[in-house]
Amino acid sequence: MADTDRQVIVVADPVEMARAAAERIMARIDGNEGRIALCLSGGSSPKQLYRLLASDVYRRRIPWHRVHWFIGDERFVPEESPLNNMGEARRIFLDQWAPASNVHAVPTFAPDPDDSAERYARALKSFHGADAFGPDRPLFDLVLMGAGPDGHTASLFPGDPALDESERWVVGVPRAHVEPFVPRVTLTLPTLGSCREMLFEVAGSEKRAILTRLFNGENLPANRARSIGGQTVWLIDHAARPESFRGQ
Ligand code: 6PG
């Protein structure tokens, strides 16, 4: 898997990673005078970033009325559950600062993940104002991503047929390969890739093994996720950096 279009930035630790991610988000916001679409990620890695965005320094810089918040994948649990990705982002910062109508959560009250996925796809298409995306008009300004210990990203797991989905924007995932073992709803690779910037955050020594595999070019979901026509940036911290990696 060619990764020449991936830029890797090594930072000291998770604190510096959150700051670097926040600055990249601000650069995307500042570069767009109109409506901004940011797609958040789940898991534990982005929580520090979310706390930072809620801090005085950043929340004053964010034009909240024109920023719309989406989520790249969701655990199929009620929004009040601590496992719900958008629920966590809301509790940490969105409920405090973002207009409710700018927060676009996956409807986990739907009868099942497939139905929920269809509803979210409709919401995305209506927001985008089109049923298709082109590199000249990406869906998102920035998509935040993480990488799991098995190389998954969003809720796209190794070997899952959802990885090859080219038509549907969002799909239901009946079984997660890692904890929490709840069904998921995930944006597909073309949808996630329709962005000006895809930004990965990967930190901690427990991620070193999978980063080694990913940077060796293994055909894993996190290696297949990239911005189509924009920038793909990986923020990794010192603890996660593979020994063989001499980039920075
Ligand atoms: C989720 C995710 C998932 C996550 C990675 C990394 O719902 O769990 O969106 O893809 O981003 O597993 O998670 P950590 O940041 O917790 O390592």
Image (cartoon, rainbow, N blue to C red):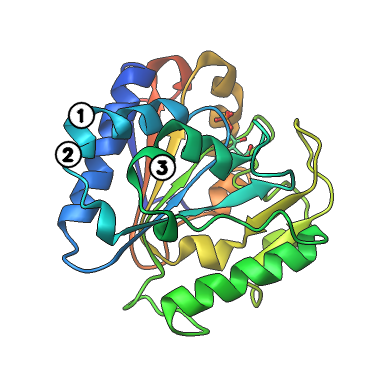
Mark 1 vs 2: CB contact within 8 A: yes
Percent of width and height locating residue 181: 81, 36
Residue 105: which numbered mark, if any? none
Give the left or right position of residue 175, taking residue 165 as reference: right
Give the Cα distance between marks 1 and 3: 14 Å
* Residue occupied by mark 1: 56
Percent of width and height locating residue 159: 78, 51
Residue in the foreground of this view, choosing between 194 and 113: 113
Q: Amino acid at mark 1?
A: Asp
Residue drawn at x 41%, y 69% is 139
Residue drawn at x 44%, y 67% is 194
The disc, 3 or 2, on the residue closer to the chain's N-terminal end is 2
Give the left or right position of residue 150, taking residue 93 as reference: right
The disc, 1 or 3, on the residue closer to the chain's N-terminal end is 1
Residue 248 visible (yes or no) = no
* Residue occupied by mark 2: 60
Q: Amino acid at mark 2?
A: Arg
Secondary structure under the numbered disc 2 in the rendered image: loop
Q: Amino acid at mark 3?
A: Leu
Residue in the foreground of this view, choosing between 164 and 218: 164
* Residue occupied by mark 3: 94
